[in-house]
Image: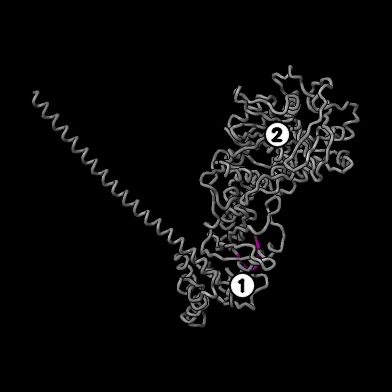
Amino acid sequence: MISADIVDLSSDDEEGSNLKAVKLEPDVVGAVMLPKEHTKKNVIKHEKPNTEFVSQRFDENRSPNVLSAGQSSSSILDQVPSPADDSGLTSPSPLCPAPVCRQFWKAGNYDDAVAAKVTVQSSKGHLHVHPMFLHSNATSHKWAFGAVAELLDNAVDEIPNGATFVNVDKILNARDGSPALLIQDDGGGMDPEAMRRCMSFGFSDKKSKSAIGQYGNGFKTSTMRLGADVIVFSRHVNNRVSTQSIGLLSYTFLSRSGYNRIVVPMVDYEYNKASGKMEILHGKEHFMSNLSILLQWSPYSSEAELLKQFDDIGSHGTKVIIYNLWYNGDRRMELDFDTDPEDIYIGRDIKKIDTLCASKAICEQHIANQLQYSLREYLSILYLRISENFKIVLRGKAVLHRNLADDLKFIEYILYKPQCGGFVEGVVVTTIGFLKEAPHVNIHGFNVYHKNRLILPFWRVVSYSDNRGRGVAGVLEANFIEPTHNKQDFERTSLFQKLETRLKEMTWEYWDYHCGLLGYCVKKQLRVTSSSQIPSSITVPAGTENPHILKQCFPVTVTEGRERARGRSEQCTLEAQGKSREGVCNKRKADVLVEDEQSVRANQPKNQQAIILLEENRKLRAKCSDYEKRKEELNLKATQIRSDVREVKLEIQRLLDELKSMEAVKVEGIV
């Protein structure tokens, strides 16, 4: 592959579109000007068959007002020192200037003259990507923590490549001491070509069905949402050949330099086994031109400082540094690093728990509220499952994984098989129950995951005015629907609407027949719904006669069943006004959920879904039994070891006593 000196993030809608060579103005890269001696054309190849891109002339990349300043357009190669003068190259600028506007939602006001220019080039109408797109594309993230999660997804996707951690921390900008955000992992890293695809739009190398990332857009949207500029360091090993790359995506550089298309300066190194050193790739002239831009617009003013960033990466891994972080409307930094030294907050006034009443304090301390402003709380539930060998480290302290299903009581499983066009799209088992803090918290909703990643936390599918649904929460993994690009919502398809309808029904059904467990008055008796009464939004498996909606639910454990039995007794007490308590309870017992294996098997034709879950329960019980046996064996071994230790101690004591007696006899003999 022939690598260009600057990566051009142009659209690749047409194959075989050839563009012109990049040219820079003298004031863009540095103060040193050399004669025009090295004008060349450089080709960028993407991993798309028969598609080549040659960089566009800079007189088409810069706005008309920049070119009209009387400066001559010269090749980018003319802006670098000659090989004889490259020793100790440093940035000519003492500071890397921050963007003009530091508030994210106002930073899209690019130069009107530049923005108004039509940038369709060549006879084939090849469309360029304007720098304004970096900002407008990032506005898909309304929530800053959603952007952080996107970057963590990249690290989690590297677990199959050996990643064991991702570190999120605050560091200081080496130029001006301002806060910057660090995200680093020890995954496989990126080779130069992979780095270019990462910096470009619409490329994704993630072919695994379990991979979270899939659109090839997350890195650009997330980094530009958090700060105006990002620099990436990555080291990769392939066939025992080690490479390391540095790339800069800078909204500040593009806007202050007057570009009307997105370009990304990059430098690449490869380890030379013969010399035992890292050597530059793709020619020294190309390398030096990009390096000079990096040194002027990055936090590092010398090549030595840039290379020092690889010291803690190891043999492979990636380090992302986002600087010139955005401010909010109150002119405070959006990411708050000061409130808690072990956490990152979103800049806002945190309510003081001590000043709230008891009920409001419980709600405020619940994770459903804390995840909105605490990154540690959000990251603890970001993934449904996490490898024991992988750690998320936030500001030097590991984030403890939290399973939201553990925060529920009176748990039940409900099986749902969404259908579209007569075909089953998937099988979803929803865990539903009351929050442990219920009824003291005014919180409810479902936590919906997609491919192990949390998309909708505490999604409120119902609204209530009479407490119906209060405290009901659930957890499910819905892989049959697609998330939006920012992974904070789902595409509004018919399958999504069916899921929303079904979750509403689950909430109301669960509440109606279990609210007595929380002390509320039960308004409905458990009923059996015939197929003619089932709403059209609920899919009935073929071959099922007279299906029972609530017979999809059954207790998870014997303990849950006992708790529910006590709850039903309380319900009977509440409803027994003017009736015989025994008669009401007997009626409830006749209508309740199937709670033992014998009853389920007697109704096998009508309750196939419960049979499936019961079989899973049986397997889990078998595993539990095995664990208990192993526990007993280990206890026996421990007891035996303790007994042996005691015997050894007694033997040691006996030998010591014998030794003392022998020494005493010896002393008497001498006397």
Tell me if 31 is positioned left or right of 491 in this view: right
Q: Nearer the viewer, residue 90 or 11?
A: 11
- Under circle 2, the secondary element is strand
Q: Which of 93 and 202 is in front in this view?
A: 202
Q: Mark 2 points at which residue?
A: 247
Q: Distance between the residues labelled 1 and 2?
A: 56 Å
Image: 570 above or below 460? below
Tell me if 501 is positioned left or right of 410 in this view: right
Dot 1 amino acid type: Ala
Q: Is the magenta stretch mostly helix, strand or loop?
A: loop
Q: Quadrant of residue 58?
A: top right
Tell me if 69 is positioned left or right of 311 in this view: right
Q: Nearer the viewer, residue 282 or 362?
A: 282
As for residue 462 lying within the magenta part, the answer is yes
As for residue 194 lying within the magenta part, the answer is no
Query: What count of labels does the image hold?
Result: 2
In the rendered image, residue 145, in percent from the top left (x then y), is placed at: 66, 46
Q: In which quarter of the image is the C terminus?
A: top left
- Which disc, if any, is residue 542? 1
Dot 2 amino acid type: Gly
Residue pictured at 52% horizontal, 80% vertical? 577
In the rendered image, residue 409, in percent from the top left (x then y), is placed at: 51, 62
Q: Give the range drawn in magenta.
A: 460-469
State which mark lies toward you, 1 or 2: 1
Q: Quadrant of residue 288?
A: top right
Residue pictured at 34% horizontal, 53% vertical? 633
- Under circle 1, the secondary element is loop
Residue pictured at 79% horizontal, 21% vertical? 32
